[in-house]
Image: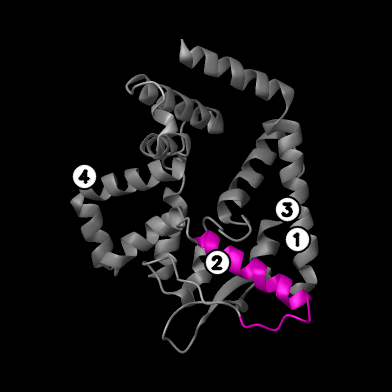
Amino acid sequence: RDVLCVAIAGLCHDLGHPLFSHMFETYVRGEAAKNLLARRPPGYETTPEGAAELKKYTGWEHEQASIAMFRHLLESNPHVKEGLLKFGLQSEDFLFIEELISPPAEFGKLLKAIAKMSIGMEDSSQEEPPEPVDWPCRGRPHTHAFLYEIVSNWRSGADVDKFDYFARDAYYLGLNSVFDTRRYISSLRVLRDKRCVVATTAEERNIFTLSPSEKQLDSLRMDAADTRASLHRKAYQHKTSLKLDFHMRRVLEL
């Protein structure tokens, strides 16, 4: 079930990704916010209610659209959901798939707890145990935390979504990618992260994470960083790409 859910989430992660890459995403946020404020009285955005409503538009991400389309897919095609249930999925698995596509924002609290403990471990004078934090997901328990690092990695951003565009964009742009996806995946291990303790009555209170072997960790991270930097420098943030983005937004605004 876990393997099937991760596979479905990987396939559906970018369902809601609009055309023209992230340029259109920026355009949608701006236009949606402008249309909202045009229907509201002047100064509405400065009120607590207005700021909260405006944030729904300015903070829109394509993963939200992916989840909406995934739900629509199941609701509009009952035979698809029935087939998945017959294949072994259960009702909570559909929520799990949505959480894999877009991990809950509350994962930020886990990151803060991990960062705090990392600093404490470096300072030998601090020996306080980690403060328990709530597990933010309902699709799977905290013991399955590592599964949330495959499609959209809330920890480091090293996930199959990035590996996909690393390989595809480098190939079609004629760039040499130093990052070896197969080597990275084959080196992964599931490790207990003692820096994070979940508020639970279960015997196992730590979460588990995916990590390459310590021997290869630094070189793999450097390869991924070099590939990403090269793509941004030679393509995504290239002056010609930025000019095209600007003019395309102007065309759409007309």
Which element is circle 1 on? helix
Label 4 and label 1: CA atoms lie apart by 43 Å
Prevalent SS, magenta region:
helix
> Residue at 62% of width from left, 51% of height from top?
163
Q: Residues within 10 Å of mark 1 (few under 14, many from 20)?
A: many
Disc assigned to residue 220 = 1
Q: Which residue is mark 3?
A: 224
Tell me if residue 33 comes above or below residue 222 in the rendering: above
Q: Which residue is at the front of the view, 144 or 50?
A: 50
Going from N to C along the chain, the mark reached first, 4 or 1, is: 4
Marks 1/3 in contact by CB < 8 Å: the verdict is: yes
Which residue corresponds to mark 2? Answer: 110
Q: Between marks 2 and 4, how big is the CA–CA gap? A: 36 Å
Q: Residue at x 70, y 31 (%)?
A: 237
- Local SS, label 4: helix
- In the rendered view, tell whether residue 125 sits above or below residue 88: below
Question: Which secondary structure lies at badge 2?
Answer: helix
Image: 136 above or below 14? below
* Mark 3 surroundings within 10 Å by alpha-carbon count, few (fewer than 14), some (14 through 19), many (20 or more): many
Q: How many residues crowd around disc 4 within 10 Å: few (fewer than 14), some, or many (20 or more)?
A: few
Answer whether labels 2 and 1 touch (C-beta < 8 Å). Answer: no
Image height of 115 relative to 247, above or below: below
Label 3 vs 2, first from the N-terminus: 2
Mark 4 and mark 3 lie on one chain; the one further toward the N terminus is 4
Give the CA separation, mark 4 to mark 3: 39 Å
**Which residue is painted at 46% across and 30% down in the image?**
29
**Residue stretch rendered in magenta on the structure:** 107-129
